[in-house]
Amino acid sequence: MDSDLLEALTGGTSLVISLVIYVLLVVAMWKIFTKAGEAGWKSIIPFLNLYVLFKISWGNGWLFLLTLIPVVGLVVYIIMSWKLVKAFGYGVGMFLVELFFPNIATLILGFGSSTYSGPQ
């Protein structure tokens, strides 16, 4: 009986922590969009948020369709990540954070003091 209670508490705690992280990431993405002059609500709609990210980083949102092509999509997404951090004034270090720890990079771009300078 005690193990059931422990499992329930552990599961509940994991759920709460996951929800807090999700909300933080949504707010950070919202802030990234508003820094770039886009409506923040676009960050919560699937595919539209990807379109806007490509528009912010490349200048042409429709390039996000390339991510649907296997292998090409991965390369295009990596290039988009580089262009995104450059658009906010960061360099190689932030690109590596974006590449290997994208959630942390989202929080830094959203809540940090960087400003959007347009597609690079």
Image (tube, helix red, strand yellow):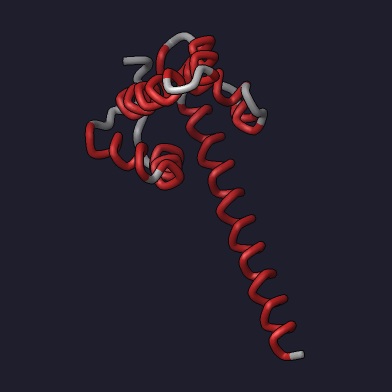
Q: Position of residue 119 (x, y in %)?
A: 37, 15
Residue positioned 58% across, 41% down in the render? 26
Q: Position of residue 77 (x, y in %)?
A: 42, 25
**Residue furthest front as drawn:** 70
**Residue furthest left as drawn:** 92
In front: 107, or 39? 107
Query: Number of numbered discs present?
Result: 0
Residue 37 showing in the rendered view: no
Please state, as top left, top right, bottom left or bottom right, where the C terminus lies in the image.
top left
**As displayed, is residue 34 above or below residue 120?**
below
**Residue furthest right as drawn:** 1
Q: Position of residue 68 (x, y in %)?
A: 54, 19
In front: 71, or 66? 71
In front: 48, or 75? 75
In front: 7, or 16? 7
Quarter assignment of residue 25: top right
Q: Position of residue 18 (x, y in %)?
A: 60, 57
Residue positioned 60% across, 30% down in the render? 43
Seen in the image, is 23 located left or right of residue 118? right
Residue positioned 58% across, 25% down in the render? 49
**As displayed, is residue 101 above or below residue 117?**
below
Please state, as top left, top right, bottom left or bottom right, where the N terminus lies in the image.
bottom right
Seen in the image, is 90 located left or right of residue 54? left
Residue positioned 64% across, 70% down in the render? 13
Residue 24 showing in the rendered view: yes
Seen in the image, is 12 located left or right of residue 34? right
